Image: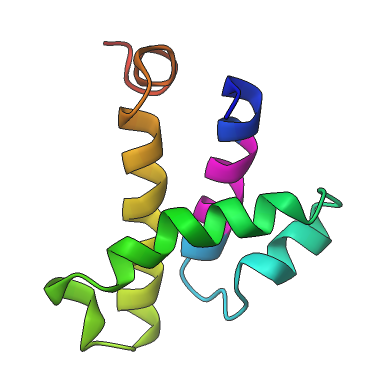
Amino acid sequence: MKLDDKRKVIEVLLCCGDPGHTGGTAEVVKALALPAAYQAVAFQAWSPVEGEPKYRDDWSEPSISEAYTEAAYRLIESSPTLRREWFAR
């Protein structure tokens, strides 16, 4: 995945993680007028997180939002360039 693609997927995940957001990746991708492929990548980034013990048994809105945000941070941490952009390190 290219760096610009990761940026867009991070944007999708952070939108989904916004407190009060009730939609999922498909709704955000559509609202941002992104290609449908971004939805699949965002879902792939989020799915492992939602299955972790901390999140898998808590389907409340705050927990789901936190899982989306965690998935976004993991993508950021996966790239030295994105880490520098987001955290200046």
Seen at 38% across and 55% down, the residue is 69
| Residue 57, quarter of the rendered image | bottom left
Seen at 68% across and 50% down, the residue is 38
Q: Extreme right residue here?
A: 33
- Number of numbered discs overlaid on the protein picture: 0
In this rendering, is residue 5 above or below 30? above
Q: Please tell me which residue lies in front, 45 or 23.
A: 45
Relative horizontal placement of residue 60, taking residue 1 as reference (left or right): left
In this rendering, is residue 6 above or below 58? above
Q: Which image quarter is the C terminus in? A: top left
Q: Main secondary structure of the magenta part?
A: helix
Seen at 56% across and 74% down, the residue is 21
> Residue 44: horizontal and vertical position, in percent?
48, 58
In this rendering, is residue 17 above or below 13? below
User: Colour scheme in the image?
Assistant: rainbow
Relative horizontal placement of residue 44, taking residue 25 as reference (left or right): left
Relative horizontal placement of residue 17, taking residue 77 as reference (left or right): right
Magenta stretch bounds: 8-15
Seen at 32% across and 21% down, the residue is 87
Q: Please tell me which residue lies in front, 11 or 1.
A: 1
Q: Which image quarter is the N terminus in? A: top right
Does 11 lie within the magenta span? yes
| Residue 42, quarter of the rendered image | bottom right
Q: Please tell me which residue lies in front, 21 or 30.
A: 30
Does 56 lie within the magenta span? no
> Residue 41: horizontal and vertical position, in percent?
57, 51
> Residue 62: horizontal and vertical position, in percent?
34, 77
> Residue 76: horizontal and vertical position, in percent?
39, 32
